[in-house]
Image (spheres, grey):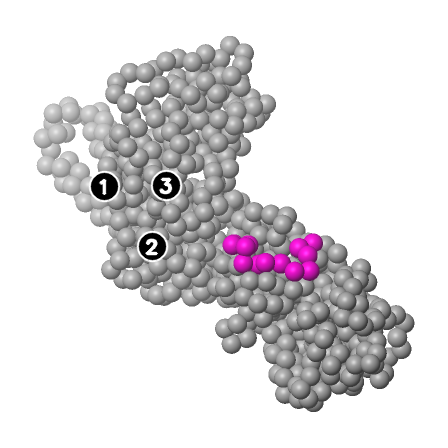
Amino acid sequence: MDVLLVGGTNGLMDAMIDKLNKEGHRIYVLTEHRFQNSRNRKAFEYYYFPYDSDSLKEVFESINPQLVLCMGAFDTNYDWKDARKESVRYSLGITNILTTFADREKGRLVYLSSEEVYCDSYTVNITEDTPTSARGFRAIALAQMEQQCKNYSRQMNLDVIALRLDHLYTRPRKAGECFHTGAKMCMEGLRTGKITASDRYQISMLHLQDAVDFIYQVCVCESHQRSLYNLSSSKMITQMEIAQILRDTLGGDTEIEDNSVGSVHRVVLSNEAFAAEFYQAIRHEPHESFAQMATYMKKHRNAFLTTDGVSESFLNRLLGRTAALFWALLPFVENMICFIPFFMLNNRATDSKYFAKLDFYLLYVLLFAIVYGQQQATFSALLAILGYVFRQSYHRSSFEVMMDYNTYVWMAQLFIVGLIVGYMKDRLNVMQEENRQEMRYMEGQLDDIQNINTSNARMKNLLADQIINGEDSLGKVYEVTSRLNNYEPEEVLFYAADVVAKLMGSKDVAIYTIANHSYARLYSATSQKARIMGKSIQYTEMEELTAALKERRVYINKKLDERYPMMAYAIYSEDEMQLILMVWGLSWERMTLAQADTLSVIGDLIQNAVLRANRYLEALEDRRYISGTPIMEEKSFTKLVRAYLSAQMQGLTECALVAIDIKDFSMEEAAQKVRGVFRQTDYLGQMTGGLYLLLSNSNERDAGFVLERIHKLKMDAHVQKGIDL
């Protein structure tokens, strides 16, 4: 199916992409930052849009995803340094994703939250029905989005699920990925030689790989009972126990500083609701995982001590602030420097016959008003007034200058002209910026449309190539399975095994026919490995296999049990199970949902050929058997024997042909006597004037038991070899 992952690049995102890709799903990624996040090659397509963008609707329509997985609490596109501002952006983005999903009214949306919504201490394990106790902008935002998912699921009848992950942890690759308790404590031990821990801090931790398995089960399940699940190991561990594991692994002079003060703080999520519906197996225990993590971090300690995890030095902070202050003061310094030549020009022009009427200070104020706006116009006017007063004080006192009416008229003229021109400059800048923003927005919209169109064209061409050239395409499957129609009705099931083997890419395929409601008999197989279960099996004792076949699903051997095939599928006829296709020798990478879908399609196409053959044989049953006897007439029996011998030569089955000497008995009397000797899957027939018994799926050693029974009936019999048909 088509899956849309929403979030930035991190360990959880990469692990989900690997899991979905291995299961045969097509993966699309929606993220905000084009350059800050690296691309995963296993993802089919990347889309770079803000989560609150109007283009999300076009993205959803273009992808048409059956599943939307929102990283939520684990989305690296949010840094949460300014928690108040980021909580608003987070809520707006997730809400836009939910509303866009709701507008389509199909598919499933899974939202990932965390245990951070619980800030209080709980004496018992926390269930999904326990009210949240979020404190802080981030925790409140996560809790609100959980509630949003519940509302969309309940009130709008949408398939929306929130998954609450309990203290997710994994091995970090660099300092910036040390987000969980164990990694932070190990980092502290590497840097300071001390690990601060408390035995009153009690939590339950979930490894990333286990979390991925649980998330995937929820994503692909056919139905679910709740809209919120806790994903947790529910195994409590204290901070002091983690510190002891890290100290033992780091060794050296690492010490534990006991910080056990205050009351017990216990946050352990209950996994009972999830375990009741889904398969849950914790494969990564914290004790072993933390020891491996500490070993890795100790070996690569330079990567954790010299990267972005180290605080910025005082010198770097000082240089950064100095540079910012310099660029802020630069226009004022430039203003003061430019004032000097204008002051000198004004002094020279005062005594000039030609330039006495020219006001250089007004030109100076206009210049900075035009270039920088109101702020610098005001500052330049103040400098001009100081220069004017200073020049006038050459001939009269400052008091006289300040009492002169002309001085205030000139000052008013200076400020009025400067402020008006500066205001016009500021407004012009604002209008230009608004135009630039609108232009950037329109260009972004155009780029979005072009990207979506390019992506659609690329997907169209790729899908067309898959349909035309793909080895597992429907066209290819139909072409191969349709060859069964060219075989005789007696041969269809023999070569059906060979068809399944070719299409599934396995050399080991077996076909069992249902003998009754609990036993199945081997009909054909392509290898000795495919015959490992034996010639007759009681399939009802295989509970997992039988449950899947009765539900008409493809059985997948997820536990890799050597007793069972890797995949199996049943063929039905009018609600009755007729055949079981068993495929062995598949690698773990090929045991995907895509491969399972291929097997179900192959089975359905084979079913058509088998039903056609059975109906043909049923229609000719009166002609194939001698009336009133179980003896096949010579032509039909010869044709059947030829089909078995041909299949045996190709290694698809085993058979033995027994010739019976009826002596003084008639053909009908001999047939009635040997009727209890052979099985329902064996055939009795007339050929070359004599009576023969064809033992299906039997070799000469197996035929020995039948010969003994015939001899007890006072008749001679032997295995016929080298018969010329």
Q: Amino acid at mark 1?
A: Pro
Q: How crowded is the residue under tag 1: few (<14 C-alpha within 10 Å), some, or many (20+)?
A: few
Lower sequence index among marks 1 and 3: 1
Residue kind at label 2, given as amino acid type: Gln
Residue indicated by mark 2: 225
Give how far apart the Cα atoms at labels 1 and 3 are.
16 Å
Kindly identify the residue that appears in the image at 45 percent across and 18 percent down.
244
Q: Is residue 412 magenta?
A: no
Quarter where residue 396 is shown: top left
Looking at the image, residue 324 sits to the left or right of residue 538; the answer is left
Does 720 appear above or below 98?
below
Residue at the top extreme, as displayed: 253
Which circle marks residue 610 in the picture? Answer: none
**Which residue is more in the foreground, 447 or 323?**
447
Q: CA distance from mark 3 to mark 2?
A: 14 Å
Q: Which residue is mark 3?
A: 271
Bounds of the magenta span?
A: 532-544
In the displayed structure, 144 sits above or below 456; it is: above
Marks 1/2 in contact by CB < 8 Å: the verdict is no
Q: Which residue is mark 1?
A: 131
